[in-house]
Image (cartoon, rainbow, N blue to C red):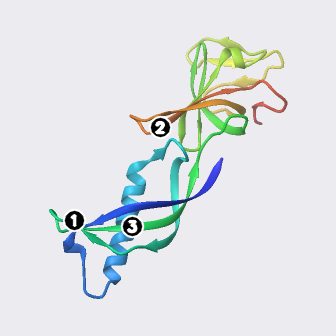
Amino acid sequence: MFLKSQLSWNVAIPAENLDAEGSILQKAILVRLLEEFAAKKASKDIGYFLAVTTLDRIGEGIVRPHSGDLLFPVDFTCITFKMLPGEVLEGVVHKVLKHGVFLRCGPVEKVYISHQKMADYHYVPGENPFFRNDKLSKIEKGTSVRFLVLAEKYDEAEKDFRAVVSLEGDHLGPIS
């Protein structure tokens, strides 16, 4: 799900980026905010950081004693993406294993469907393995799939999410 979030961060600007007029300062703050935003990648509470939409407020800068850098409190609005249990989403298969498949859904690379959550599908081994059901519906690498999110977990070390999903339910499975 896409979320609109309002955040407050502190942005540090090196002293050499300052000018008397302040126009370069505002640009330097915005550039630094965008760099930090991209580097942070994701947060457990609000998901993957996708885009800063508005810079709402730049507070008064505070000089850091040892470096001379200025620290500015910044309020901004952004768009994030987080999978929520019970949500129906779509993804694309990128890896087929004997016990299930991995999908990509937006910025999430580790979306797993266990073979136990693919009712009526059975594994077909080979050079390009896939899952098939009795109606000849096929789940293979590159297949778009609609699924139900069962659970998600945040990996702090990788700043990444993992999700366990299911095809059990109405209108779930490969999309033609």
**Which residue is located at x 46 percent, y 61 percent?**
8
The disc placed on residue 141 is none
Vertical comparison of 172 with 70: above or below: above
Res. 153 image quadrant: top right
Task: Specify the amino acid type for callout 3.
Answer: Pro
In the image, residue 137 lies at what x, y percent? Answer: 78, 23
Q: Secondary structure at mark 2?
A: strand
Q: Earlier in the sequence, mark 1 or mark 2?
A: 1
**Which residue is located at x 78 percent, y 24 percent?**
168
Vertical comparison of 86 with 76: above or below: above
In the image, residue 112 lies at what x, y percent? Answer: 60, 26
In this figure, which residue is indicated by the disc labeled 2?
160
Q: CA distance from mark 3 to mark 2?
A: 26 Å
Task: Specify the amino acid type for callout 2.
Answer: Asp
In this figure, which residue is indicated by the disc labeled 1?
64
Q: Earlier in the sequence, mark 1 or mark 3?
A: 1
Res. 151 image quadrant: top right
Q: CA distance from mark 1 to mark 2?
A: 32 Å
Instruction: Give the side of residue 65 with respect to residue 56, left or right.
Output: left
